[in-house]
Amino acid sequence: MRIILTSVYVDDQEKALAFYTDVLGFVKKEDVPMGEHRWLTLVSPHDPDGTRLLLEPEGHPAARPFKEALAGDGVPFTMFGVEDAQAEYQRLKGLGVEFTQPPVEMGPVIMAVFDDTCGNLIQIAERTDL
Amino acid sequence: MSDVFHALAAPARRAILDELHERDGQTLYELCTRLTMKHDLEMSRQAISQHLDVLEAAGLITTRRDGRYKFHYLDTGPLRAIVERWRVPDPEE
C-alpha cells in the first residue's frame, strides 16, 4: 500500500488553484469536470510523479465548522516540506501570504504556519538533521 | 495577588510564559508544539488550554482575536506587584 493522494478542503477550487500554483508553486496534474466541481490535483515540480494534492470542494456541511475550529486554535491542516523555511517564509511574505507562525526551530525541525486563503492553515517544515 | 502565585507555581505554566517571552503573540497550536518539542511536556491540548485559562485569570496573559485566529500575549504587569512588595532599596540610590 502506498500513499498516492492527500487532500485539502477548499472553499473555491478556482481560487485555490491560483494560490496553490501561482503562489506556492505546485503544478496542475489532473483537471477533470465532475458535475458542479472538478477532480483537481496538483503535484510538486520537484516530484511530478509523487503524491498528488487534491483540491477538494468543502461540500459537506461539517467541513466549514471543522476548518473554523482548527484555524481558531492555529492548527494546520497539513504539512509541506521545504529546503529552507526562512527563505520560503520571506518569499511567501513578499507575495502577501499571511503567517500565524513565523519559522520557529523546534528540535530537528523549523516550522512555520500560513493561511492558504481557502480556509486552511498550512505548515511548512524544514528538517535540519538530514 | 494569590492568583499570580498560584499561576506561577506550576512548571508547565512557567514554561508557557518562557515561550511567550521568547515570542509574543502565539496560537494555541504554536504553544502546544513548543511545549512538546522544547520542554518535553506530554500534555493534551485541553490541559494546555486549562493552564492558559489559569494564566489569563491571573492577568499574566491576554488573548486577542485577529480575524479567524486567536493569539496569546504575555502580560508581566502583575509581576510588578511582587517586586514592589519586597522591594530592597538599591545601594546606588
Image (cartoon, rainbow, N blue to C red):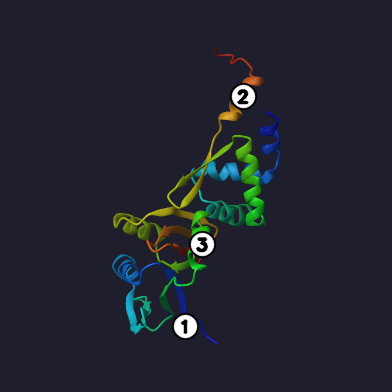
Q: How many marks?
A: 3
Q: Amino acid at mark 1?
A: Ile
Report whether residue B40 is seen. no
Q: Amino acid at mark 3?
A: Pro
What numbered label is drawn on residue A4? Answer: 1
Q: Chain of mark 1?
A: A
Indicate the quadrant where residue A95 lies: bottom left
> Do discs 3 and 2 belong to a common subunit?
no
Residue at the image position 67 percent from the left and 28 percent from the top: B1
Q: Amino acid at mark 2?
A: Ala
Is residue A126 shown left or right of residue A25?
right
Q: CA distance from mark 1 to mark 2?
A: 58 Å
Instruction: Using the image as rendered, state which of residue B13 and residue A86 is in the foreground.
Output: B13
Q: Secondary structure at mark 2?
A: helix
What numbered label is drawn on residue A65? Answer: 3
Neighbour tally class for label 1: few under 14, some 14-19, many 20 plus, Cα within 10 Å = few
